[in-house]
Image (cartoon, helix red, strand yellow):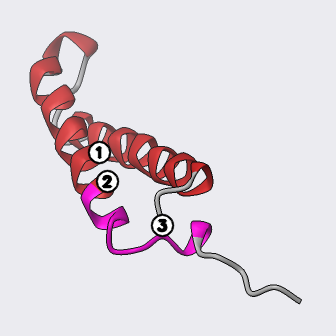
Amino acid sequence: MFTKEWLKAALIRAVRTFAEAALAYIGTGAVVLGDVNWLGVLSAGAFGAVTALLLALAGLPEAEEKPAK
């Protein structure tokens, strides 16, 4: 389960989830760049990334072993 392919897929998913969570947090009321609570953005992104990594333990379709032909 914990192969290079799995790790790469899990990290890609975590980075994407970080970006999505951070973007969602920024988009909830920031009119100008100064209005953004950057600590909150990083916190939401980190929480999303950790959640994605934990969910990856249950399985990643991108990294599942393909049956040999």
Left or right position of 65 against 36: right
State the predominant SS element of the stretch in magenta: helix
Q: Is residue 69 above or below residue 40?
A: below
**Tag 1: amino acid:** Ala
Which image quarter holds the C terminus?
Answer: bottom right
Circle 1 sits in a helix, a strand or a loop, which is it? helix
Image coordinates for residue 39, horizontal then vertical, percent: 11, 20
- Disc 2 element: helix
Q: Residues within 10 Å of mark 1 (few under 14, many from 20)?
A: many
Q: Which residue is mark 3?
A: 1
Residue 67 vs residue 58: left or right? right
Q: Indicate the position of residue 29 as horizontal and vertical percent values.
A: 16, 36
| Spatial separation of the CA atoms under disc 2 and disc 3 | 13 Å
Tell me if residue 27 is in the magenta stretch. no
Foreground mark, 3 or 1, reads 3
Q: Are marks 1 and 2 in contact (CB under 8 Å)?
A: yes
Which residue occupies 48% across, 70% down? 60
List the residue tagged with mark 2: 53
Q: Which residue is the site of mark 1?
A: 49
- 60 lies left or right of 57: right
Question: Is disc 3 placed on a helix, strand or loop?
Answer: loop
Residue farthest to the top, as pictured: 34
Comparing marks 2 and 3, which lies closer to the viewer? 3
Q: Nearer the viewer, mark 1 or mark 2?
A: 2
Residue 40 image point, x, y percent: 10, 29
Q: Position of residue 51 (x, y in %)?
A: 22, 55
Return the disc, 3 or 1, that comes first in the chain's sequence: 3
Q: Which residues are magenta?
A: 54-63
| Quarter of the view holding residue 64 | bottom right
Q: Residue at x 64, y 76 (%)?
A: 65
Q: Is residue 58 left or right of residue 64?
A: left
Q: CA distance from mark 3 to mark 1?
A: 19 Å
